[in-house]
Image (tube, rainbow, N blue to C red):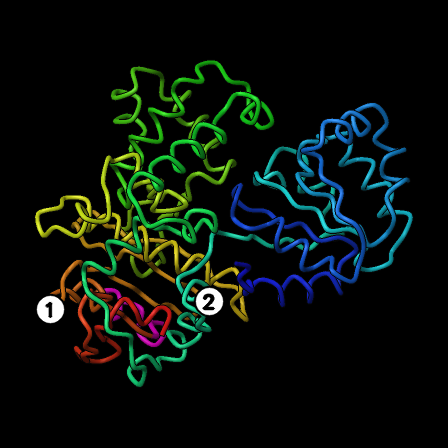
Amino acid sequence: MEIDRRMLIPTRELLAGFRALVVNGPRQSGKSTLVRQLQHDRGPVVNLDDPTVLQAVRADPVGFVDSVAAGSAIDEFQRGGDDLLLALKMRLDSDSRRGQFVLAGSTRFLSMRNISETLTGRVGIVELLPLSAGELRGTHETFIERAFAASLGDVTAAATNRTDYADAIARGGFPELALGPATARFRNGWSDAYLRTVTAVANVEQVAEVRRPELFGQLMAQLAARSAQEIVVADLARELGTSHDLVRAYLDVVATLYLVRIVPGWTTSHTNRAKQRPVAHLVDTALATHLLGETADSLGDMSSRWFGPLLETYVANEIAKQATWAERPVTIGHYRDRDQREIDIVLERGRNVVGIEVKATATPLPQHARHLAYVRDRLGERFTLGIVLHTGNQTVVFGDRLIAAPISTLWS
């Protein structure tokens, strides 16, 4: 079953304007399918996972680039390293035509040292994350646009309960996993194999010097247990029995490999008591569910300690996916201050701000919006809307620019 991806239209638009287009994203998120759809009437796809092709690239990167016809796609481009990057730069500098290449990769290789500078102004960049809830359900998601238009109150959300959300968390969005058997055995087996593959030294060596490869699995387990919490490097170093510097280095690696999303702290001059620590979300809640030894059934139990944190990560991931195809750029942060006020997700577009709280309750109360009200009062007209997303099925107005809405509003 091949699902139409929302990123197909944005990628075509960018490809028409840039000399080349980079498609970044986690392994198994559907990049190859997207590239194949994109290349349907453009040209061939060359995959550097092929050892013969990779050997040719490493032996003669300039000759390889010269041999690739304009309109081609190069999958797993990051495997070619800096030499391939420089050869491509030479090609693009000598030819200003638009849409010459599509470059797909499974690491944030454009954020690595020197690479962004190398291709600045020559390439458009898009991220393809795992399937969104709307893509899986066949709906057209516009939550971010409606939030900034303050028009969520007129949306009829699909009836959804705790069991449905628990299954969505355990299912995740990786195509092979989300569309596969809905059994704990399959989900655990797939997630275990995925983590082993992505964190294998052969892959990690592409982005860092690995001194203690066994720490990757341990670090991922710790981050899953701290889902949606602030990252405290000292605590992680103590749990892992290693140095602060090594924890920071490996946090960079798991982010570069698209295993974890690091969400920065948000503040303005009007909220200057904010703390700056980032929070971490695993890129897909199926991986977090597996690392914590949970299943859809155990998460659905009212006594589950993990349902709330993983629900917040699930919502944060869905919003991050929608941000990749939003009409206008939007930044995503979180808010915590020294007086223990917090907002799970802060969206900022220009001067406008939307705050989102995620609550694992079907009965939202006005007190759930008190921190949203605090930031609203300090930002004034900059504050567009505060939203309490909950597991019930009712939309409730709490006051000036404050509402509670079902989590399923994300894809309704």
Is residue 314 found left or right of 194 in the rendered image?
Answer: left
Q: Position of residue 196 (x, y in %)?
A: 44, 27
Secondary structure category for the residue under label 1:
loop
Is residue 304 found left or right of 206 in the rendered image?
Answer: left
Q: Position of residue 76 (x, y in %)?
A: 66, 38
Q: Position of residue 284 (x, y in %)?
A: 39, 46
Q: Which mark sits nearer the N-terminus, 2 or 1?
A: 2
Position of residue 396 relative to residue 50, above or below, is: below
Position of residue 76 relative to residue 174, above or below, is: above
In the image, what residue type sits under mark 2? Arg
Residue 148's tag is none
Quadrant location of the C terminus in the rendered image: bottom left
What's the residue at 61%, 53% (across, down)? 33
Q: Which residues are magenta?
A: 375-384
Alpha-carbon neighbours of circle 2 within 10 Å: few (<14), some, or many (≥20)? Answer: few
Residue 349's tag is 2
Residue 380 within the magenta-colored segment of the rendering: yes
Alpha-carbon neighbours of circle 1 within 10 Å: few (<14), some, or many (≥20)? Answer: few
Q: Which residue is mark 1?
A: 363
Asked if labels 1 and 2 touch by Cβ distance under 8 angstroms, the answer is no
In the image, what residue type sits under mark 1? Thr
- Distance from label 2 to label 1 (Cα)? 30 Å
Q: Choose between 330 and 266: the one closer to the eye.
A: 330
Q: Choose between 69 and 247: the one closer to the eye.
A: 69
Residue 364 within the magenta-colored segment of the rendering: no
Q: In the current view of this chain or complex, which residue is farthest to the left?
A: 303
Q: Position of residue 283 (x, y in %)?
A: 41, 45
Q: Choose between 306 and 402: the one closer to the eye.
A: 306
Is residue 217 found left or right of 102 in the rendered image?
Answer: left
Q: Main secondary structure of the magenta part?
A: helix
